């Protein structure tokens, strides 16, 4: 009986290592080494990882990817493969999921959450068929994000073993080994393997702070709508070549999505490759989907080309063609936005009456807005219908209630300018004042100069003097403002002040005639006709056409 009691503990002691060895020789085939490189080709970092999918999907630490331009993996057979795409990352828990070019890979099975007290084994990367697993136990399991565990392990690990998998007795990965804080011999940590494998790319990943720290390309989401969002976000953050490559990847992944061909057509058009863009738009029409939107996008592409690249003719694309495509979109789906597009095209063609009729329809549609009334007013301005132009600008401003919000500012400014142009000076000044109240410190010297002109027209001379002084304060080297100030000072009888302003102008810009003209005029008006005539003659020598009439008047 004593002999049996002595043998039984030895049997139990050897049982667990034997169970680990039963899956270790197979599991080691799923291990890999990750190496990342900087832009100049130098090695950035090296880490361990393992496959979690059958098509090259793998996980490892996130840290090696920071600043990396490219990366490779070396599998258990010693074969090297490039890392193609990032599939997700988390900086806080230092995990990354990525796609390697290896195919037909053997993934490690992922375990559900493990419990405190469970036995675990650390599987190191090894060149031999049966690695030396390190046995340990879970001493604590903290829940995070409601479904994942962060484990504290009674296990001694080397620095070189970080990112290695921690498995249970069934050979399933429980966690990924993480660095310990400080010198804690015998204690290690691991983050849930499920957390690492659940990392994925979505439509907003191109703005993810962690993923933006690596130059390894991001995979496209599996959902087409999410992938489209990725295309939109990436357009402002990628180089042209990177973005073109992303669009090609989208087309390869979603060959039946019209949007891919539309995005590529836009890119081709921006490079002046209109024939290729035309081919892509025809493909977009053939693959189906929302045909009205494809016709709309086709019309918009042509319209933008004709407006901004009209110096590069392409016979297949004209504004009439754009209008026809927009009409097709409207026939399929009578949306107001398609009528708005047609109005813009007709305006660009100079067909202002037809453009106005379309905008007029839109004032009674779901697009009724200040912008629509403003566009209609521009049509009337081109048709020289002043009364209707101003009435439509009134309607644009009336889309807002007092006190005005800042979005009303452009329409107040537009009405002010129109009123000024039609010599309605005091109403124009009122609108300029409303605009100034909304814009505050964002106003520049040109605004104060323009309001000063309106104030002069409305005989508001004190306000005009204040505004021209403000313009000079904001732009002290602009000679035009000094000339305007001297002219205004002469108008209101401030002859002495006008002479001082004119001398400042002469000192600043002696090659201009205005300084001599206003100095001479102010001198003549204060009975300094000899000096005044000399300065008027100097203005004449510099090409001023007004000078001779003044010379004739004051030299008698």
Image (tube, rainbow, N blue to C red):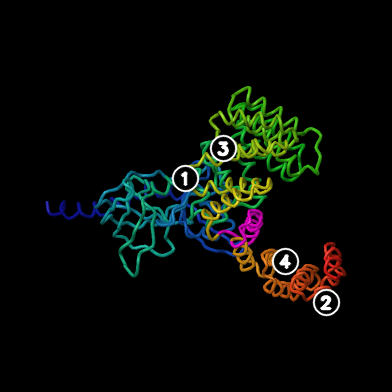
Circle 1 residue: 402
Boundaries of the magenta span: 442-462
Q: Is residue 67 left or right of residue 329?
A: left
Q: In this view, does 45 lie above or below 235?
A: below
Q: Work out whether residue 3 or residue 136 is closer to the camera in this orientation and state it.
A: 136
Residue lying at 52% horizontally and 45% vertically, measured from the top left? 56
Q: Residue 395 carries which label?
A: 3
- Prevailing secondary structure class for the magenta stretch in the rendered image: helix
Which numbered mark, 1 or 4, is in the foreground of this view? Answer: 4
- SS category of the residue bearing label 4: helix
In the rendered image, residue 326 lying in the magenta stretch gets the answer: no
Which tag is nearer the camera, tag 3 or tag 4? Answer: 4
The image shows residue 69 at horizontal and vertical percentages of 59, 58
Q: Do the residues labelled 2 and 1 touch (CB within 8 Å)?
A: no
Q: How crowded is mark 2: few (under 14 residues within 10 Å), some or many (20 or more)?
A: some
Q: Where is residue 402 in the image (x, y as percent from the top left)?
A: 47, 45
Helix, strand or loop status at disc 2: helix
Which residue: 49% across, 47% down?
404
- Tell me if label 1 and label 4 are in contact, CB under 8 Å: no
Does any portion of residue 478 appear in the rendered image? no
3 vs 2, front mark: 2
User: Between 271 and 499, which is closer to the camera in this rendering?
Assistant: 499
Q: Earlier in the sequence, mark 3 or mark 1?
A: 3
Residue 452: horizontal and vertical position, in percent? 64, 58
Name the mark on residue 483.
Answer: 4
Q: Distance between the residues labelled 1 and 4?
A: 38 Å
Which residue is denoted by mark 2 in the rendering?
530
Q: How far apart are marks 2 and 1 (CA)?
A: 57 Å
Choose mark 4 or mark 2, whichever is in front. Answer: 2
Question: Which residue ends up furthest to the left in the rendered image?
Answer: 1
Task: Say whether marks 3 and 2 touch (CB < 8 Å).
Answer: no
Tell me which numbered mark, 3 or 4, is placed earlier along the sequence: 3
């Amino acid at each position: 009986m004593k002999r049996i009691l002595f043998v039984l503990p030895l049997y139990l002691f050897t049982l667990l290592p034997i169970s680990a060895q039963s899956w270790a020789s197979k599991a080691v085939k799923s291990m890999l080494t990750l190496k990342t490189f900087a832009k100049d080709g130098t090695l950035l970092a090296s880490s361990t990882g393992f496959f979690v999918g059958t098509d090259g999907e793998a996980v490892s630490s996130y840290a090696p990817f920071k600043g990396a331009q490219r990366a490779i993996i070396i599998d258990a057979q010693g074969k090297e493969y490039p890392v193609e795409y990032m599939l997700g990352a988390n900086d806080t828990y230092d995990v990354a999921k990525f796609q390697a070019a290896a195919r037909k890979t053997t993934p490690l099975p992922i375990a559900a959450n493990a419990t405190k007290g469970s036995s675990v084994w650390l599987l190191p990367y090894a060149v031999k068929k049966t690695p030396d697993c390190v046995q340990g136990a879970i001493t604590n399991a903290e829940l995070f994000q409601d479904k994942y565990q962060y484990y504290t392990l009674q296990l001694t690990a080397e620095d070189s073993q970080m990112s290695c998998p921690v498995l249970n007795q069934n050979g399933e990965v429980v966690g990924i080994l993480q660095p310990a804080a400080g010198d804690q011999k015998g204690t290690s940590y691991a983050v849930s393997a499920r957390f690492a494998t659940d990392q994925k790319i979505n439509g907003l990943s191109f703005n993810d702070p962690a993923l933006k720290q690596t130059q390894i390309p991001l995979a496209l989401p599996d959902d087409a709508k999410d992938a489209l969002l990725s295309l939109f976000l990436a357009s402002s953050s990628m180089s042209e070549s990177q973005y073109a490559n992303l669009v090609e990847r989208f087309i390869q992944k979603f060959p039946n999505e019209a949007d891919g061909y539309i995005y590529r057509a836009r890119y081709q058009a921006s490079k002046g490759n209109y024939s290729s863009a035309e081919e892509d738009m025809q493909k977009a029409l053939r693959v189906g989907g929302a045909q009205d939107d494809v016709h709309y996008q086709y019309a918009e592409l042509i319209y933008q080309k004709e407006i901004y690249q009209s110096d590069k003719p392409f016979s297949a694309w004209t504004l009439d063609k754009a209008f026809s495509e927009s009409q097709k979109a409207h026939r399929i789906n009578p949306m107001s936005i398609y009528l708005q597009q047609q109005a813009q095209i007709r305006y660009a063609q100079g067909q202002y009456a037809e453009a106005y009729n379309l905008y007029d329809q839109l004032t009674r549609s779901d697009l009724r807005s200040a912008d629509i009334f403003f566009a209609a007013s521009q049509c009337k301005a081109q048709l020289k219908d002043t009364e209707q132009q101003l009435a439509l600008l009134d309607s644009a401003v009336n889309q807002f209630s007092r006190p005005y919000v800042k979005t009303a500012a452009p329409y107040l400014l537009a009405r002010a300018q129109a009123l000024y142009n039609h010599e309605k000076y005091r109403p124009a000044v009122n609108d300029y004042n409303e605009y100034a109240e909304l814009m505050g410190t964002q106003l520049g010297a040109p605004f104060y100069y323009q309001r000063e002109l309106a104030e002069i027209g409305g005989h508001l001379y004190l306000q005009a003097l204040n505004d021209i002084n403000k313009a000079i304060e904001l732009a002290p080297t602009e000679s035009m403002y000094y000339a305007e100030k001297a002219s205004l000072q002469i108008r209101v009888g401030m002859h002495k002040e006008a002479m001082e302003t004119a001398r400042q102008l002469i000192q600043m810009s002696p090659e201009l005639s205005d300084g001599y003209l206003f100095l001479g005029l102010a001198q003549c008006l204060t009975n300094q006709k000899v000096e005044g005539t000399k300065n008027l003659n100097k203005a004449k020598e510099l090409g001023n056409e007004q000078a001779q009439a003044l010379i004739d008047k004051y030299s008698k």
